[in-house]
Image (cartoon, coloured by chain):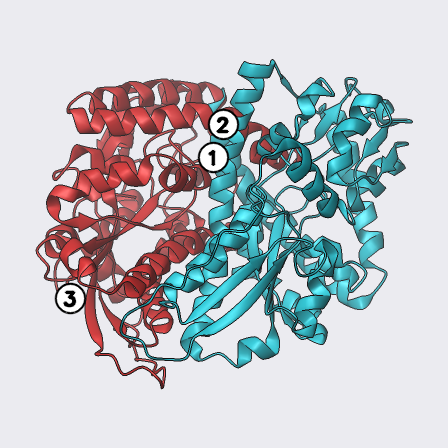
Chain colours: A red, B cyan
Amino acid sequence: MSSRRQFISAAAALVGSAGLLAGCNKKEEAISSGSNSQEKIHWKLVTSWPANFPGLGTSANRIAELITQLSGGRLTVKVFAAGELVGALEVFDAVSAGIAQMGHSGAYYWKGKSRAAQFFSSVPFGLTAQEMNAWLYYGDGMALWEEVYKPFGLIPNAGGNSGTQMGGWFNKEINSVADFKGLKMRMPGLGGEVIQRLGAIPVNLPGGEIFSALQSGAIDATEWVGPYNDLAFGLYKAAKNYYAPGWHEPGTVMECMINEKAFNALPADLQAIVKGAIRMVNHDMLAEFTMRNQKALHDLAKQHGVKVKLFPEEVMRELKRVSDAVLDEEAAKDPLTAKVWASQKAFRDAVTPWTDMAEGAIIRARSL
Amino acid sequence: MSSRRQFISAAAALVGSAGLLAGCNKKEEAISSGSNSQEKIHWKLVTSWPANFPGLGTSANRIAELITQLSGGRLTVKVFAAGELVGALEVFDAVSAGIAQMGHSGAYYWKGKSRAAQFFSSVPFGLTAQEMNAWLYYGDGMALWEEVYKPFGLIPNAGGNSGTQMGGWFNKEINSVADFKGLKMRMPGLGGEVIQRLGAIPVNLPGGEIFSALQSGAIDATEWVGPYNDLAFGLYKAAKNYYAPGWHEPGTVMECMINEKAFNALPADLQAIVKGAIRMVNHDMLAEFTMRNQKALHDLAKQHGVKVKLFPEEVMRELKRVSDAVLDEEAAKDPLTAKVWASQKAFRDAVTPWTDMAEGAIIRARSL
């Protein structure tokens, strides 16, 4: 899931038609600790999501609530949906300029600021959520991300992970690499570049326009997020063939950036609270998506007769080969991006045998 | 990894011979927030681990450090290694009685208190770490765990996860189910019960005695934790065949229990800080083990020539069939355990197809 301006449209689509979302953010109420006479600090958190957008907007709300709770109300954070204070794709600039102290978004939106940014969200055949956290927190990941955002006066943080996404909805079966020839598929970013090399025509559409484009035949296929968000968009009504896995986004990281000056002005305990609350939600979102995705997958099957298909091995092999070529070329365009991808790729290749014999092997065995 | 008294011996073995561990806990120093005049509170955290035991003891230290940081030193927590204040297997009683306010351990040690407890650590062919967090935080897991510990005046928390463990070290190859006949294997708990039904002789040995027992031939095989901890124990010197995956512990949860009365006496912000710090470390430990295990796996291969083998499919299929039978029988022994296992089993069966087509499919595809 990634595209310029898609979330603004998605907001309009969801609020206007699906009616899933409340019209306003949850109010932040300061909890009085009863014993704390310090001056209260008020921060703003701008997001790239519609208000209370399931999983993403709600995680931004949760970061704000946690900061209030952990600080006993000394620091309160007001969340702004996309378009309320700044546009969905103005989050980076707004937090950099100090218009808001925090921003919740996805790093792949900021390719125009630094090509390296997209490697901190998710890349084709990259790291799973568990591996990404290992690389960020116990490898070189966070230090590299900080280096990339430093020139903009921003402190990056991982602010949530969707886990492995889905491969998308197709109006025909994918039985071989040849089936990508001429396929008009909504797939932005590096994934779009990969399928283009297989002969497909990648299309960039905002979330709110996907459903009608797929139903009208303007596109033949689309990816979105996973069962939880795909069900909410009703994509099963527009195409029959639902494919796994989301090879283009194996574990997508959300980000929660902080304005460096505002952060440095906080006392040490509030700094720890801000970083701690974000880190907690980064992990928790994965647990939430795991719960909601499995439930939505069952609903798709039972209520709407959706049977998930796996891409054939031949197709996955070719997608991986082309993905690595695309990533290597992208990284070679500037030295900082090259450094980031070299680190992430080395870790991916090093951790792959371990993940395969640990989580991979027990997952396989349970389905024997 | 689980057995009565093993950690006390493990502590002795490590401190006495391997020399890996410092002799004392890291000192907790109160960080003055400079602006907070409240009375400082001092808590004790007892553990079932040797001082600074890699991954486990260090995670208990980290919980204590985080609480100090997040509270600006208003609440400080002193960590005690096994045997310093109470014994490794006296943690539950000590926290229940208020001798310490917190305890870091593993729930499967408390089967004698409540049979249901062991279902909150890890069971054969149970949940992966990611799934366990989904069940605990977004399913019925935490509420059930609280119900189990409530009669003891304890508030349970997940306090770390090792991820999928390893299947163990064997002095011969396992090519079929028949190879378990007569096999003397160190494997405590429910896993031991499972291999017994396959004709093996499960042996319960403390960690510190495993190496010499395996080397002398007193046992033919042993499980311990994963590459990180197994390398530290030098098990590769005593048996050649290293098998994956750890079917008996697919995602082992550590616990961090809190004395209910002590917790209720805290102001709301310190309550949020205590729970928040534990939750953060619960997630972080998985990232740490992922990093350290993949590194140790490479070291085992490159420096010690260890090649990991996967159990044959026939063996995994039979282990799973017997495991489910053992778990069903165990759960049927009392109503609360039955309720806990019914919930966890239903979630495992519901989440399995999702995990298989998400993380499972991308992990498989990367190794094609």
Mark 2 burial class by Cα count in 10 Å: few <14, some 14-19, many 20+: some
The residue nearer to you, when weighing A180 against B297, is B297
Q: Secondary structure at mark 2?
A: helix
Is residue B62 placed above or below B195 in the rendered structure? below
Real-space CA distance between mark 2 and mark 1, rounded to the nearest whole angstrom: 6 Å
Dividing the image into 4 quarters, which one contains the C terminus of chain A? top right
Q: Are marks 3 and 2 in contact (CB under 8 Å)?
A: no
Q: Position of residue A238 (x, y in %)?
A: 36, 46
Report the amino acid beneath label 1: Met
Question: Left of B64 or right of it: where is B332?
Answer: right
Label 1 element class? helix
Tell me the chain of label 3.
A
Q: What residue is at 74 percent from the left and 56 percent from the top?
A: B89
Same chain for the residues at labels 1 and 3, yes or no?
no
Q: Which picture quadrant has residue A259? A: bottom left
Q: Amino acid at mark 3?
A: Glu
**In the depicted view, which residue is nearer to us: A212 or A270?**
A270
CA–CA distance between discs 3 and 2?
46 Å
Which kind of residue does numbered mark 2 sit on? Answer: Lys
The reply to whether residue A300 is visible in this rendering is no
Asked whether residue B172 is in view, the answer is: yes
Q: Label 2 lies in what chain? A: B
Q: Which residue is mark 1?
A: B291
Q: Are marks 2 and 1 in contact (CB under 8 Å)?
A: yes
Q: Which residue is mark 3?
A: A84
B330 sits to left or right of B284: right
| Residues tagged 1 and 3 counted as in contact (Cβ below 8 A) | no
Against B227, residue A6 (above or below) is below
Look at mark 2 in the image and give the residue it sits on.
Answer: B295
Q: Residue at x 64, y 32 (%)?
A: B18
